[in-house]
Amino acid sequence: MKQLLILSIVGLIFFSCKKDKTYHSFNEKQLAFVNYSNGQNLKFIDTSSVVQAIQQFQFHRDFREQVGLFGKMGILSEEYEVTYSPGNSDLGLHISLGAQLPFVDVTFASYQTFQRIDSLNYSFPSVTINGKNYSDVYTLKVYKNGQQINNNDTATLFHNKQFGVIQLMYPNGKRIIRVD
């Protein structure tokens, strides 16, 4: 009985101690993919000069507390997720990442990539697309329906910190370009 009382007191002291919260925020490379604000709508034009607008229907940027075996751990990790709906086309856009996860997940027009943030480098310090100059542009290899194994249907996604997705270029030369 005495041992149970001592264990109860130690357990009560252990769980009642106030823990300082630890915050894991996005690093500079991760912030390059946190481009869109709440309520923002986007327009893109394709090679045949058809303009398509997509509307945002999900936006989330917040800190989420990790939960362990004994409850909340006091570790908060920043998360970001944005989704745009294309309406009646396949031009949807989805981006998600978490501060403690080393990957970015980008899906655009049925093409997807899931890449390590640390392995990405700016492909172009500056590039002009459709008459507009963009700086610090990443190029990402994206796969049709996200299937990387035995998938020859790939495209190149151009992305920068200021505007997000700026162009999707197919191997046959067709393009989808962001317009403001």
Image (cartoon, helix red, strand yellow):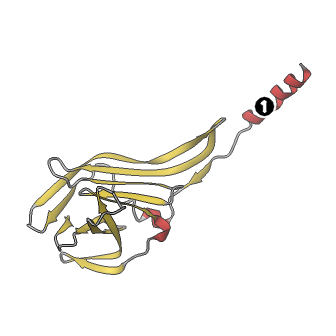
Number of on-image labels: 1
Query: Label 1, on which residue?
Result: 11
- Decide: is 157 above or below 18: below
Note whether 91 is above or below 169 in the view shown: above
Residue 147 in picture, x, y percent from top left: 33, 58
Q: Which residue lies furthest to the top in this view?
A: 1
Name the residue located 12 percent from the left edge and 60 percent from the top edge.
Answer: 51
Vertical side of 123 occupied by 38: above or below:
above
Secondary structure found at label 1: helix
Front-most of residues 160 and 1: 1
Q: Which residue is drawn at 42% across and 52% down?
A: 80
**Splitting the image into 4 quarters, where does residue 176 fall?**
bottom left
Residue depicted at 24% across the width and 79% down the height: 128
Q: In the displayed structure, does residue 46 sit left or right of residue 102?
A: left
Identify the residue at horizontal 23%, vertical 57% (top origin). 109
Q: Where is residue 102 in the image (x, y as percent from the top left)?
A: 50, 60
Quarter where residue 91 is shown: bottom left
127 on left or right of 175: right
Image vertical order of residue 63 relative to residue 6, above or below: below
